[in-house]
Image (cartoon, rainbow, N blue to C red):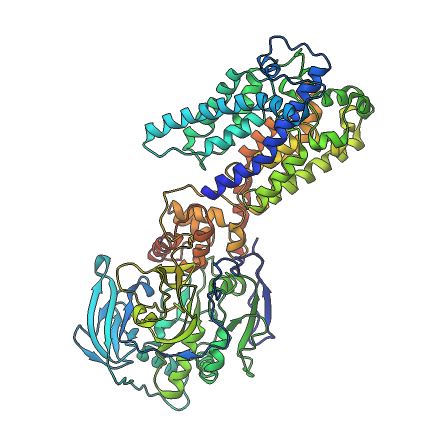
Amino acid sequence: MPDQATSPPKFGSQSIRITIKGGLDTKNLFPKSRHNGSVAESDIITKPSISRVALLGRDYSNTRFDIVADQGTTVIAGDPVLRDRKRPEICLSSPVSGTITAIKRGPRRSLASLHIEADNPQQQREFDFPADPGADDIRQLLLRSGLWATLRTRPFGHIPEPSQSPAALFITAMDTRPLAVEPTRVISSYERQFNEGLTALGQLVDCPIYLCQKPGAGLSNDNTGRITVAEFDGLHPAGLPGTHIHHLCPVGAGDREVWHIDYQDVISVGHLMQHNSPWFDRVVSLCGNGFKTPRLLLLPIGSSVSDAVQSELIDEPSQIMTGSPLFADAIGSDPAFLGLGQRQITAFRETESNNGWFPTSKATLIPTTDLDQLVPDGILAVPLLRALETADTDRARELGALELIEEDVALLGYASNTNTDYGPLLRAVLDQISREGLSTPG
Amino acid sequence: MERIQQLRLCATLPVIIAACINTGHQFLIAASAGADTVGDWRASLIQNFDIDPGQPGIVGVLVAGLVHLLPPLVVAIITGGVWERIFSEARGRPLEKGFIYSAILFVLLMHPAIPLFHVVFGMSFAIVFGSAVFGGDGKTFVTPALLGAAVVQISFPAALIGHPVWQGLNGHAGTSLFSLFHEQGSAALPWEGFEIGSAFIGNTQGMMGTTSVAAIIIAAVILIYGRLASWRIVAGSLIGVIGAAIICNIIGDGILDMPWYWHLLAGSLIFGITFIATDPGASCVTNSGRWIQGVLTGLLLVLLRIVNPSHSDSMVPVLLLVSMLAPLIDHGIIWLNIRNRMRSQVE
């Protein structure tokens, strides 16, 4: 039975602490070597030079884009290059100055990727806003700069409708994924921007704002009571926004919507408020024993992975993935680029066997006893997975599919005997629900 | 799937070894007490090895045990393999290896003098109707080995009556421990040779794999630690058995007086709880459901032992019944979960 609070706490109350039981112990998951594949706390962030970036259609599920800047156009960082076909006020902006070299299409003429070759020197577009911005001003600012597209809704994980207001806003400032960099480490380097970003978001919405962090992180210096600190203590998936939302403002019944945003995107908002242009870089950790020295890099959004990891890899053959080892895109023959929410590039030596990156024959799901520990308390894992496997949309919805996006079910796929990636199955169900509309539950 | 199959076989290992030792030992005890073993092909085979029943040594015990355990096991595996092959050819799918585990469990549930024909019959039924017609490994809703054991029990109920060596076994109905309790209550135990210590390690007559509670506990730990068996089902069953036994003790005499620890030590109860009740395909998939299933199993196990004096080891019918109820229990838990989810939004 769900054990969440029955009503969201009031604004600005004392901090909340939630202990998450179960979960995946990631410390011993990965093969040991000279280093254990994770980044040391004191590492400096270095900024390699990146010449190619790409915006990836798969980061914006279900959104159809119109092309604003066509192949061959020169853009500066911050210029809009894509617009949401249905909501033209939402745009994606270029993370670098340069020339658009290619636009690749996916199935049914959706956008697969938009490639930009970066120039030297880099220029940034400036966005003006009034001295004492109100909610509307901030909204317009985020839309024009392309930062609106870093917000996500729950349910569905779409870009929010600008005219809507959420029931709550979640700031994800913790990361429990294996070998992930500690957010406090990054925030401490960008503290002022982070706080400015929180203030701006506090102006944008008038719902409760939850700053989700690990216990003792002490990330907020907010005195206005606008922000409620929520500490989550536990193993992965304790750090996923799906878990936080489940406990503080559950959306499974389909009658309300919350938004969530990642801490580095908050830094970008703060940077925009301070310097009139967004921060287009992100701190990414190189982790895993396939790298000579795991470290932190400052990379532009959509950075080419091969540009980033040049000379970082060990000499032996290794398997490289963008994203955390649990929920990653293996790099195949296509050149790979860093997705919007990906904060890790993982490389493992090929000699060690890594669970789950190679498709196995279709096995039947066996209800092992660990599966229930890997979803938020109150979601029944095996019935949900069975509903996803049979594409039983109504059942999946009843069991809480609306609370989840792909990253939440990645753990289940990893731990189950079928080794199936349940992400696409979940996305198919969510797409169907969103097409049919939320007004008729069950 | 590989990990699960390996884990299962690993868990059966202590039980197989204990079965071997205990069965051999029991046979030699009976033989040295002068049981007339003419006509028993197993006895003849054992005599070929020149084992002195009074002083067999560990090798002698193992040989005696293997002669009882190995032929049915080989026959069961071959039978299962033949049926799996037939179905995999007919369906165009690769051969699934789950039948090996089913064969092992099935044979462990058999008595030591099981005719090999019964093994073929039971295993065929188990694989065809307990597994293949539902789609094979993972898709069964009842443990195939259990179904096979049930069919053998029902079809050949008069087995072992009057058997020179194993007459203490009363066929598939459970050891004479039960009839003792039925007739005479707990006073009967000490001089019939039923001692707690030996019952715990398995030094008694019984279905081959079910005698050694100690070995089965090791298997249970392996299965639970390997995340295949739910500790909730095991704990719930124990609570159910102990609770029901205590209530029975309060209520009456005779079989009702059987203490909870004898319930746990006697018959195939612990074997059933460990290997069959926890079978992920045949049990509840929700944690709350697992508790309910466990307690229900425990209660019914004791209850059915009490009410049926002629067939006292209730494990097979009870576990069949409960595994068929498991989806219904889950259904209720899921219904509650959905209702709570919808309700928690209404503020």
Q: Nearer the viewer, residue A367 or B200?
A: B200
Q: Is residue B144 visible?
A: no
Tell me what residue is drawn at x 26 percent, y 77 percent: A80
Which residue sits furthest right? Answer: B187
In the visual, does B295 lie left or right of B245?
left
The quadrant in which the C terminus of chain B is found is bottom right
Residue A328: percent from left, percent from top: 38, 60
Residue A441: percent from left, percent from top: 43, 53
Residue A110: percent from left, percent from top: 24, 62
In the rendered view, would you say B89 is above or below A262?
Answer: above
Residue A51: percent from left, percent from top: 26, 76
Q: Nearer the viewer, residue A97 or B223?
A: B223
Q: Is residue A181 visible?
A: yes
In the rendered view, would you say A350 is above or below B263?
Answer: below
The quadrant in which the N terminus of chain B is found is top left
Which residue sits furthest front? Answer: B50
Tell me what residue is drawn at x 34 percent, y 70 percent: A309
